[in-house]
Structures are given as C-alpha cells and as structure tokens.
Amino acid sequence: MKIVQASERKWLANQLRHRKGNILIKDMLEGEDGSPENYKFFLSKESADFFSPRHRHPWDQIRFCLEGSVPIGPRKTVDAGEIGYFPEGVHYGPQDGDDRFVAILQFGGASGQGILSSDQVNRGFDELSSEGVFKDGVFRRKSGSGKRNQDGYAAVWEKITGQEMINPPPRYKEPVVMNPKHFAWRPAPGFPGIMQREIGSFSERGTRIDFYNLIPGARRAIPDTPHLRLLYVVKGTGKCGDHPYRRHTSMELAPGEKIRFTPKSGTEILAITIPSVMALGLNAA
C-alpha cells in the first residue's frame, strides 16, 4: 500500500503551462511513467482566470468537485459534491468560471495509449517554446514542422511521443456527471459496519467508482478487488493499518491487497478501481 498525507505535500504552481491562467496542483499518487497503466491523482485549485479551450484527449479522467463548480461546457458544470467521468475521445470545454477545488484522476483509457506524466508535459512545453507560443490553451507554431494552430496538450503529446495524437472514437456523447448524494447507501455484503454507494462502471475496461461509509466502533475492512484501486478520504479520521488518515489522505492498493481501517469518526472514502489494460487484453499500444 502507498499512503500519502495531503498535509505533507506542497502546492505547486505552473504545472499546466500549456493552458491559460493560474492553477495550483498538489501531486498525491502516480503510476509508472511510460506504461499504458500510468495514472496521476492530484488535488487542484483552479482560479477563475484558468482557461482551457474545448478539447479531448486519448485517456480517461475523473473529477470530484470539492468546492465551487467545474465548467465543462456552455451551461454545463460539475458542482460541489458531484463527480464527473470524462471518457477518452470525448470533447468537453471550454473551461472558465469561478474558483474551484477539485480532486482529479487522469489515467490511460481502454485504447491503451496511456498518459503523459507531469514531467513529460513540462518538458514538451519547454521544447515547443522555441517553435512557437502557447496562447489561450492553443499552441501557435512559428517554426518547425507540424500544425500551425493546435490544442496545447495535443502539441505537447506529439512533441514528446513523436507520434500524432489519435483520439479513439467516443464511447459516450459527453462527460457523465453524477451526484453521489442521490445514490442510496446499502450494506456491503459480508463487510460489517460498511455502507456502499455504487456510482458506476465505465467502458470495456470496467473502471468503477464507489463510495464507502465506515461506521466507528471496530476495525473495518472494505471489499477487496483483483485490480488496482485508489482511495481518497472525503471526510473522517482514524487509522489505516498503522497509518493515520484524515481528510484528503490518499492511498494506492495493489491488485488483491486487503486493507483494514479503524475509524475514529464517521469516515467516507471515494474508491476508484482501475482494471489493467494489459490483463484485460485490450488494445494496449
């Protein structure tokens, strides 16, 4: 198990320089760079002046809005307490609006193309800066080979990988926005003291979103899974094994790994299960 306390991580600026405006990012967990299984989970404070044009990407994304409202299109938002699934190949945006605080997971989708790490994105930005300028989320080329005007992330992707960024055909028409509070809490069978909200399962990869409520009073085990799972503490305090947890504590569980909590106060956990692209025999690049 990997466990990260948000209070021990620093807020970093200028991590999305290919976009416009101010954003602070606190990196929490990440996968293996260069692998179709790569992922990055981080907390994001986006200012009202942060702007991203309408775009899409060849990987999946989940956004859990903690404060404010995340704009994802004209008159479309992910509001505080809501969670959005952004499938690979699906357009969304433009993004501009009020200040917001969001927990974000970005990970390779079922097409198996993976995702660039933050270091790769920043390196791509630096290398492209000698060939043009980034303005309002778009790369405007002045020299070198490639498109004259291109989405900033797509330009970075192609600079780093040396390959055209090809978005898979969209499986969904638009991002899926869900309100967890409208899902019923149900007892998790075989796991005393655990209530579960089953939010959804997505694409042929079978990515799952669940919430668990842990009732104080005894050690509690949440259902295990044969897949990689990421846990994020929405509220509550206690111990996970020998480690303390509090709001924003984040954990990575290896496939099949079991975990026990000793909640000191009522605890709510967001659990995201990510089956392996390779193990499922999907179109890994």
Image (cartoon, rainbow, N blue to C red):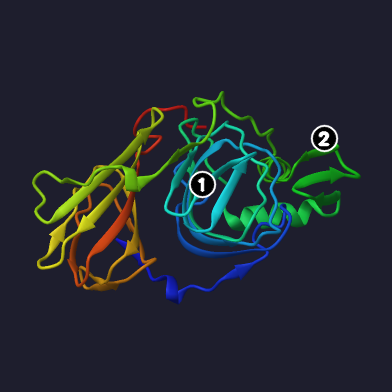
Residue 20 % position (x, y): 74, 55
Q: Along the line of sight, which residue is nearer the eye, 176 or 239?
A: 176
- Tell me: 236 left or right of 31: left
242 relative to 147, above or below? below
SS at badge 2: loop
Q: Quadrant of residue 265?
A: bottom left
User: Counting residues from the N terminus, which is met first, the one under dot 1 or under dot 2?
Assistant: 1
Q: Can you say which quadrant of the picture contains the N terminus?
A: bottom left
- Tell me: 158 left or right of 237: right
Q: Residue at x 39, y 66 (%)?
A: 248
Task: Name the kind of residue labelled 2 in the image.
Answer: Lys
Residue 278 % position (x, y): 39, 34
**Disc assigned to residue 154:** none
- Outermost right residue: 142
Q: Along the line of sight, which residue is nearer the eye, 249 or 214?
A: 214
- Tell me: 166 left or right of 277: right
Q: Which residue is mark 2?
A: 147
SS at badge 1: strand
The mark closer to the camera, 1 or 2, is 1
Residue 120 % position (x, y): 63, 53
Task: Name the kind of residue labelled 1 in the image.
Answer: Val
Q: Quadrant of residue 273?
A: top left
Q: Quadrant of residue 218?
A: bottom left
Crowd around label 1: few <14 · some 14–19 · many ≥20 (10 Å): many
Crowd around label 2: few <14 · some 14–19 · many ≥20 (10 Å): few
Q: Residue at x 15, y 66 (%)?
A: 216
Disc 1 and disc 2 in contact, CB within 8 angstroms: no
Residue 172 % position (x, y): 50, 27
Q: Which residue is mark 1?
A: 78
Q: CA distance from mark 1 to mark 2?
A: 32 Å
